[in-house]
Amino acid sequence: FQQALAAAGPVLVQEQRPLEFYDLETNPLFAHLPVSEKVALKKTDTAVAVPLLVKEKLVGMLHLGNKKSGDYFNPEDVDFFATLASSLAVAVENARLYKEELEKREMEQELGVARRIQEKLIGRELPKLPGIDLAAIYLSSRQVSGDIYSVIPVKEDQLALAIGDVSGKGVPAALLMA
């Protein structure tokens, strides 16, 4: 079935309309297909295939089997299926966009957790050293980054300053730095 879908998809996108699959051997739209793909299309028992298009992008296909009576679908039937396909295409695209939005929100939540972890690794308090005032600020260009610093007391009157900067930005750089 996947082979049949792969064969029909480009033709449906090119034509931008429902296609009848009644006679694949004589239909010029399918003349370029190898015999194996024509056989695969026949095995689906598809009489009419209707593209689900959103802005000329194929988001699905509606495959209709033969009528029980054995008659071909008439133009009114095909028009109805084309109208139905328009609504289905919008529904499929809306579902895809909704899923994409959920994934984006989940990623933002995960990045928020990563940012809080990174802030804890960097720390807020600097060691006290008599006679020296220390201050530091950490501002990431993204939610997480590959930058890190640490101020480490070595002796009572000495500090070590460690600064790290991994090339790149975002999660990959932050993971490498961690």
Image: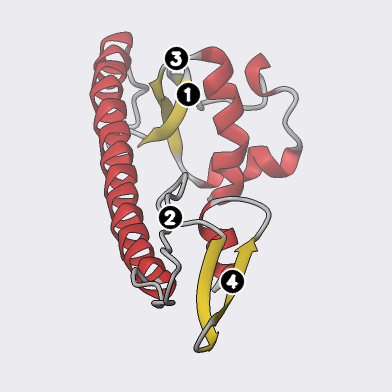
Q: Amino acid at mark 4?
A: Leu
Residue 30 higher or lower than 65, as above or below: above
How far apart are the alpha carbons under marks 4 and 3?
A: 67 Å
Crowd around label 2: few <14 · some 14–19 · many ≥20 (10 Å)? few
Q: Amino acid at mark 3?
A: Arg
User: Which residue corresponds to mark 4?
Assistant: 161
* Mark closest to the chain's N terminus, 3 or 2: 3
Circle 2: element type? loop
* Mark closest to the chain's N terminus, 1 or 2: 1
How far apart are the alpha carbons under marks 3 and 2?
A: 57 Å
User: Which residue corresponds to mark 2?
Assistant: 138
The percent coordinates of residue 125 (x first, y second) are 34, 72
Residue sticking out furthest to the bottom: 155
Circle 1: element type? strand
Q: Amino acid at mark 1?
A: Lys
User: Which residue corresponds to mark 1?
Assistant: 57
Q: From the viewer's perspective, is the residue at label 1 or at label 4 nearer? A: 4
